Amino acid sequence: EPEVTQTPSHQVTQMGQEVILRCVPISNHLYFYWYRQILGQKVEFLVSFYNNEISEKSEIFDDQFSVERPDGSNFTLKIRSTKLEDSAMYFCASSSQQGGETQYFGPGTRLLVL
Amino acid sequence: AQSVTQLGSHVSVSEGALVLLRCNYSSSVPPYLFWYVQYPNQGLQLLLKYTSAATLVKGINGFEAEFKKSETSFHLTKPSAHMSDAAEYFCAVSDRRSSYKLIFGSGTRLLVRP
């Protein structure tokens, strides 16, 4: 069964460093999302991406964040200068269509900023 | 704005007992509603979804949920709890006004006692 994969599973970084979180969505999917879950809190939307551009972003997704789909298979989230409060689990999701279509989630990357 | 409220951050049941996890939503348009389950150290897995067809929706692992428009509810039930059901459960509504991003509730941790 196709699945969304994410690498790395865990990342520890120093405050101010850049990190890139990688996701491989399901191959025929067209809509891509990043969410995050700070420990003990709810899952929050960060950004949605379609047709090689951002379709929506949340208030959390400021200038320190960027996304791209560099090669037609990977979908990356970059944080340019990490802050302590960026520590969270980051989930990638993809779906084949919008509307009521299921978003399939990856296993997540746990980011710890020291 | 759309939102989801999950009553009870923790629910504890005995093995074999009924499971009832509550979810209420707020939406200005007919909603698409989802229940996801998160096992420890794993991603989010879809249990079931409502997309304006039958109001009683059956999902995986014996779970079902009923959409009640008059009560703005989408409660999750299972007739008989199993130890393997212990996990965190998230209710979510799809934001149909924009990119169909998922708006999650704060989650309910289900504990199953032997």
Image: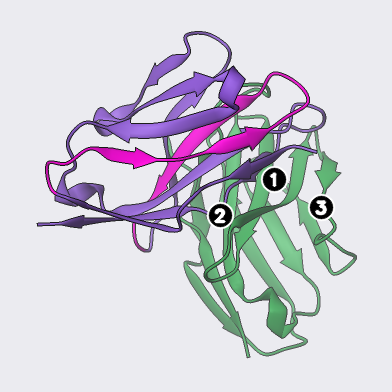
**Magenta-colored stretch includes residue B35:** yes
Query: How much space separates mark 3 and mark 1, taking CA atoms?
Result: 25 Å
If you read the primary sequence from the N terminus, does the residue marked by circle 3 or circle 1 appear first? 3
Q: Which amino acid, by three-letter code, is at mark 1?
A: Asp
The residue that disc 2 covers is B106
Quadrant occupied by the N terminus of chain A? top left
Residue B102 image position (x, y, % from top left):
65, 40
Q: Secondary structure at mark 2?
A: loop
Q: Residue at x 60, y 27 (%)?
A: B72
The residue that appears at 53% across and 65% down in the rendered structure is: A109
Q: Nearer the viewer, residue B14 or B107?
A: B14
Q: CA distance from mark 3 to mark 2?
A: 18 Å
- Left or right: residue B106 compared with residue B1: left
Q: Is residue B45 left or right of residue B3?
A: left
Structural crowding at the residue carrying mark 3, measured as other residues with C-alpha within 10 Å and reported as few (<14), some (14–19) or many (≥20): few
- Residue at the left extreme, as displayed: B114
Element under disc 1: loop
Cβ atoms under marks 2 and 1 closer than 8 Å: no
Query: On the rendered structure, is A36 left or right of A2?
Result: right
Residue under pointer 1: A71
Which dot marks residue A108?
A: none
Rendered purple, the chain in question is B
User: Within 10 angstroms of label 2, few (less than 14), some, or many (20 or more) residues?
Assistant: many
